[in-house]
């Protein structure tokens, strides 16, 4: 990530766009997932009702978050689960390290968790001498490649099978040039089996935590969370405070929406419930805030916390599809990430709310009806007012506002502009004009509509 | 019926023929059309760039020009949506609210208010229809592919009344073209790639013209078509509906 830390979305997206066939491939792959989502959604006549129901359940959750969290904690403790609270990423990482250190555990298996990505847990533990193996296949691939995930559901969607073959050859000893997905998957399977059998600690995320019962649910297609959690003596589950749902009966609504929105599947292969530890083993839940309560307090942005991390907004987003997940330089990429990230660090992620055409497709696919594109618009206003925009842009906008507020100046500027387009095209058709790089400028007509209309009125008299 | 014509700034300056077509079409359909001469811009370029706080001047000017009409009609979904969602005024909020209620994008005005059932237009070409996002998802002038709901399309309904016109199907019916206001220059690389892909979809399906209820998208797509020396042309939907041979 260090190479991308100083670059913003337009720069990173421009680098990604140097290889057009690759952009096409990335775009097609994700569009295929979006199309699968459409087919799955359209098979359910009650789809829009489901979305509305999920949205309202989440509204209730956000309005009563502390109550549900405390209820969950009490019930979880009753079930024999040990509950920890972390105000931020640092606390989260420390809690996990302490749990491992006390038992002298130096190797841990992890299932995919975007929260641990957000907290940079792997880097932290590595510095403490603890080896973490990601067990989700896609996540394992990017881990071996030394990259962060580029998508929250499909972490290595940006990698081609030939590239994965090279990574496996280098790290897992598969044959050079092997790119058959079946053979590569088998290689990963053998490698991960050894990991599952030997690790004493397992970390998982949490998709849904049920206040009523104190249990939590993890959804995976590979069963890797179960493999890790069942075999290890200590299972640590990291969850954001927003993962709460009130009652078990609400789970059906979310499970029906989650995977249909994510991949077009009716349901994940494994929806595993964890409610109490096996004899002689421990389950710990770390409940993490890390900026979420600040977002909860921002009226315009609070319902971004309804997100169930399905990734549908990324698959449908034409900007995401054509700029790649890494261009967002944040753990959660795409439209949803662009409204979550500025809450964590407004200056660092000031570019992200602008990485959108505000087309609104993200809001339409969102299974919990987050008004994503409206929030992007609102973040822009906040970021500009906070002063995180280039001075040249502010100056240009002031000039524009001045011109457009005065009919006389507007007409004069328009005339001058059209004159320039017509008689001095070199003034606009050059490398300094980003429009001109791939597009011709519009042709300038002889007269504006206003001028035409004035003459027409004159002639009618 | 007193109708005010709102011609967005870039249409006024670069595509006057679309505004002329809009005016003529509305007059043919029996509207008394006024063009308030001191109009400029809806203020969207500033607002979408995060400078909504600089749009006060534009807003007040807009209110001065457009208060008091039965309807305000605009040949651009995007500008219409901006006014509908963001026109405010400290001094004249009542008038702003009235205007927000009375402004219509051209095709929704023709279908919902004038209830046009026939047109004397002909346009014997293969036409691809680009759905502008603000018209589509903002004003809902057509049904969106993401939602589970019965399909409809106000512009397509109108184009269906035009003799000889053949609407070509597209692989991605309502994918964004990548214009996005200042996005087109700030994110030039992604924007132009998005535009190229939209253009390709139309060309692959045999379109001779690409039409839309929004000229901003068309300006972007035209820029790409002309760079490619393509014979495919862009044309605003008003020009087709007002066209006869």
Image (cartoon, grey):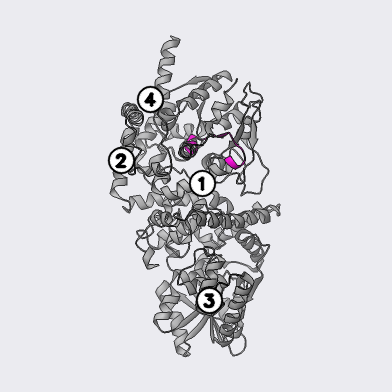
How many labels sit on residues? 4
Location of residue B160 by image quarter: top right
Residue A287 visible from this viewpoint: no
Measuring 55% from the left and 67% from the top, which residue is drawn there?
A: A162
Location of residue B153 by image quarter: top right
Callout 1 environment at 10 Å: few (<14), some (14 to 19), or many (20+)?
A: many
Disc with the residue nearer the chain's start (1 vs 2): 1
Which disc is residue A169 wearing?
3
Which disc is residue A398 wearing?
2
SS at circle 1: loop
Measuring 61% from the left and 38% from the top, which residue is drawn there?
A: B206
Q: Nearer the viewer, residue A393 or A176?
A: A176
Q: Position of residue A341 (x, y in %)?
A: 43, 61
Region of the chain picked out in magenta, as a range: B203-218
SS at circle 3: helix
Q: Position of residue B97 (x, y in %)?
A: 47, 35
Which disc is residue A180 wearing?
none
Q: Nearer the viewer, mark 1 or mark 2?
A: 1
Q: Position of residue A337 (x, y in %)?
A: 47, 59
Which chain letter goes with mark 1? A
Which chain letter goes with mark 2? A
| Labelled pair 1, 3 in contact (Cβ < 8 Å) | no
Which chain letter goes with mark 4? B
Q: Nearer the viewer, mark 2 or mark 3?
A: 3
CA gap between label 1 and label 3 equals 42 Å
Callout 4 environment at 10 Å: few (<14), some (14 to 19), or many (20+)?
A: some
Q: Which residue in the protein does label 1 denote?
A: A359
Which disc is residue B38 wearing?
4
CA gap between label 1 and label 4 equals 30 Å
Measuring 29% from the left and 43% from the top, which residue is drawn there?
A: A395
Task: Please determine if labels 1 and 3 lie on a single subunit.
Answer: yes
């Amino acid at each position: 990530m260090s190479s991308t830390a100083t670059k913003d979305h337009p720069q990173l997206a421009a680098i990604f766009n140097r290889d057009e066939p690759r952009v096409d491939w990335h775009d097609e792959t994700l569009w295929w997932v979006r199309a699968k989502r459409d087919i799955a959604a359209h098979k359910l006549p009650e789809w829009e009702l489901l979305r509305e129901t999920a949205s309202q359940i989440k509204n209730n959750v956000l309005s009563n978050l502390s109550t549900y969290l405390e209820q969950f904690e009490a019930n979880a403790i009753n079930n024999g689960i040990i509950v920890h609270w972390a105000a931020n990423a640092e606390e989260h990482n420390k809690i996990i390290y302490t749990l491992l250190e006390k038992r002298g555990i130096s190797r841990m298996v992890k299932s995919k968790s975007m929260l641990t990505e957000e907290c940079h847990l792997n880097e932290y533990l590595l510095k403490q001498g603890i080896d973490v193996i990601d067990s989700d296949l896609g996540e394992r691939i990017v881990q071996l490649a030394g990259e962060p995930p580029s998508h929250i559901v499909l972490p290595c969607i940006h990698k081609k099978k030939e590239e994965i073959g090279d990574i496996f050859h280098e790290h897992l000893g598969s044959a050079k040039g092997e790119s058959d997905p079946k053979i590569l998957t088998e290689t990963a399977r053998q490698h991960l089996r050894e990991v599952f059998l030997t690790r004493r600690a397992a970390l998982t995320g949490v998709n849904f935590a049920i206040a009523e019962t104190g249990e939590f649910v993890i959804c995976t297609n590979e069963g890797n969370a179960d493999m890790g959690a069942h075999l290890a003596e200590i299972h640590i589950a990291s969850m954001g405070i927003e993962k709460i749902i009130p009652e078990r009966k609400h789970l059906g609504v979310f499970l029906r929406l989650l995977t249909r929105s994510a991949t077009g599947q009716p349901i994940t292969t494994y929806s595993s419930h964890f409610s109490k530890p096996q004899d002689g083993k421990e389950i710990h839940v770390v409940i993490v805030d890390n900026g979420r309560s600040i977002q909860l307090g921002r009226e315009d942005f609070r319902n971004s916390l309804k997100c169930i991390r399905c990734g549908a907004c990324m698959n449908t987003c034409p900007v995401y599809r054509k700029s790649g997940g890494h261009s967002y330089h944040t753990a959660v990429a795409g439209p949803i990430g662009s409204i979550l990230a500025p809450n964590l660090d407004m200056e660092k992620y000031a570019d992200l709310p602008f990485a959108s055409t505000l087309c609104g497709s993200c809001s339409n696919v969102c299974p919990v009806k987050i008004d994503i594109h409206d929030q992007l618009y609102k973040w822009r206003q906040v970021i500009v007012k906070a002063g995180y925009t280039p001075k040249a842009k502010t100056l240009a906008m002031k000039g524009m506002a001045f011109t457009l507020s005065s009919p006389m100046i507007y007409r004069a500027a328009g005339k001058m502009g059209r004159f320039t387009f017509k008689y001095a095209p070199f003034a606009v058709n050059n490398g300094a004009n980003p429009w001109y790089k791939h597009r011709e400028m519009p042709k300038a007509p002889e007269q504006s509509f206003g001028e035409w209309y004035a003459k027409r009125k004159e002639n009618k008299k | 019926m007193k109708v005010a014509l709102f011609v967005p700034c870039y249409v006024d300056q670069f595509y006057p023929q679309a505004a002329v077509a809009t005016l003529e079409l509305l007059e043919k359909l029996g509207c008394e059309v006024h063009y308030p001469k001191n109009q400029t811009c809806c203020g969207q370029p500033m607002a979408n760039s995060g400078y909504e706080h600089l749009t006060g001047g534009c807003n007040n000017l807009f209110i001065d020009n457009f208060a008091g009409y039965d309807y305000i009609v605009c040949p651009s979904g995007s500008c219409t949506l901006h006014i509908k969602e963001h026109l405010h005024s400290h001094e004249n909020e009542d008038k702003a609210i009235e205007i927000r209620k009375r402004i219509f994008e051209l095709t929704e005005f023709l279908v919902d208010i004038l209830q046009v059932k026939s047109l004397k237009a002909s346009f014997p070409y293969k036409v691809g229809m680009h759905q502008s996002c603000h018209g589509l998802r903002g004003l809902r002038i057509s049904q969106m592919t993401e939602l589970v709901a019965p399909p409809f399309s106000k512009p397509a309904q109108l184009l269906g009344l035009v003799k000889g016109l053949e609407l070509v199907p597209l692989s991605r019916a309502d994918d964004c073209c990548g214009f996005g206001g200042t996005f087109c220059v700030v994110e030039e690389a992604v924007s132009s790639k998005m535009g190229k892909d939209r253009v390709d979809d139309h060309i692959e399906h045999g379109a001779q013209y690409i039409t839309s209820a929004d000229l901003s998208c068309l300006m972007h797509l035209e820029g790409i078509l002309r760079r490619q020396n393509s014979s495919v042309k862009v044309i605003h939907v008003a020009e087709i509906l007002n066209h006869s041979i």
